[in-house]
Amino acid sequence: MVGNKVSHSNRKTKRRFYPNLQKKRFFIAEEDRWITLNITTSVLRTINKNGIDAVLKKYREKGICLV
């Protein structure tokens, strides 16, 4: 996304809004291995809520490969 940075004097310059990416390691018990994912904080909250196995299964059904 793009937008404007607005200073105290109300001068506007272009800026970018970047996603909040975090590098995180997860242990997959079914495959008995660790994986490292670059994920957003919203996906991290989803993984904490549903579990990594459920999230990976959902994304694999959609055809999105996270690993």
Image (cartoon, rainbow, N blue to C red):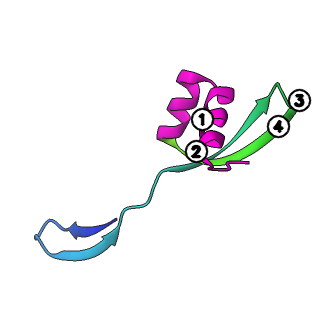
Q: Is residue 44 above or below residue 40?
A: above
Work out how far the residue at label 1 is from the one at label 4, CA to CA, in angstroms. Answer: 19 Å
- Location of the N terminus (image quadrant): bottom left
Residue situated in front as seen by the camera: 11 or 44: 44
**Callout 2, which amino acid?**
Lys
Residue 25 x/y as whole percent? 73, 39
Camera-nearest label, 2 or 4: 2
**Callout 4, which amino acid?**
Trp
Q: Find numbered disc 3 in the image and state the secondary structure of the residue it sits on.
A: loop
Residue numbers of the magenta segment: 42-67
The residue under the point 66% across, 33% down is: 57
Give me the disc on residue 34. 4
Q: Find numbered disc 2 in the image and state the secondary structure of the residue it sits on.
A: helix
**Callout 3, which amino acid?**
Asp
Residue 64 x/y as whole percent? 62, 50
**Is 48 one of the magenta-colored residues?**
yes
Side of 4 relative to 11 (left or right): right
Magenta segment, prevailing SS (helix, strand or loop): helix
Work out how far the residue at label 3 is from the one at label 4, CA to CA, in angstroms. Answer: 7 Å
Residue for badge 1: 58
Side of 6 relative to 38 (left or right): left
Residue 7 x/y as whole percent? 18, 68
The residue under the point 86% across, 31% down is: 31
Work out how far the residue at label 2 is from the one at label 1, CA to CA, in angstroms. Answer: 6 Å
Furthest-right residue in view? 32
Residue for badge 2: 62
